[in-house]
Amino acid sequence: MYARLLKIQTTTNLIDKASKLFEESVIPNCKNQKGYKGAFFLADRKTGNCLPITLWESKEDMLANEQSRFFQEQVVKFIGFFTSDPIREAYEVVAQD
């Protein structure tokens, strides 16, 4: 399994709006993508740091929705929330419960 995350910096008063957008728009759209396994939206209410995370069955599935521009279409939804450039990272999930 693979995890893709986007490190986002926003203002603390926008965290609830950003998480709601993730829950109501990004997650339902991800459910239509091949290999989607789940998602989380982590936030630090003191700093405004947020980590939306999506889980994928394989690296190929994760990369396929970037190549189809799906990932980029989801990121664009959050442009108004960013106070700095987001950072995209991906990791192999090597242990889980």
Image: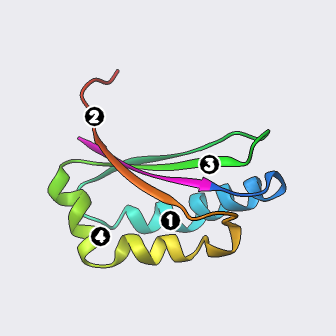
The kind of residue on which mark 1 rests is Val
Quadrant of the rendering where the C terminus is positioned: top left
Q: Earlier in the sequence, mark 3 or mark 1?
A: 1
Q: Secondary structure at mark 3?
A: strand
Q: Is residue 81 above or below residue 44?
A: below
For image coordinates 48% across by 57% down, the residue present is 87
The magenta stretch spans which residues? 1-8
| Front-most of residues 23 and 60 | 60
Q: Earlier in the sequence, mark 1 or mark 4?
A: 1
- In this picture, residue 41 sits left or right of residue 33: right
Task: Give the position of the N terminus as an image quadrant.
Answer: top left
Query: Residue 53: x, y in percent?
Result: 46, 48
In this rendering, position of residue 43 left or right of residue 85: right
> Which is more foreground, mark 2 or mark 1?
2
The percent position of residue 71, horizontal first and vertical second, equals 38, 69
Q: Amino acid at mark 2?
A: Val
Neighbour class for label 4 at 10 Å: few (<14), some, many (≥20)? few
Dominant secondary-structure state across the stretch colored magenta: strand
Task: Identify residue for label 2.
Answer: 93
Mark 1 highlights which residue?
Answer: 26
Q: Is residue 6 magenta?
A: yes
Residue at 69 percent of width and 74 percent of height: 80
Q: Which residue is mark 4?
A: 66
Q: Which residue is mark 3?
A: 50
Q: Cβ–Cβ below 8 Å for labels 3 and 1?
A: no
> Residue at left 18%, top 49%?
58
Q: Quadrant of residue 82?
A: bottom right
Left or right: 30, with 63 as reference point: right
Q: Earlier in the sequence, mark 2 or mark 3?
A: 3
The answer to whether marks 2 and 1 mark residues whose Cβ atoms lie closer than 8 Å is: no
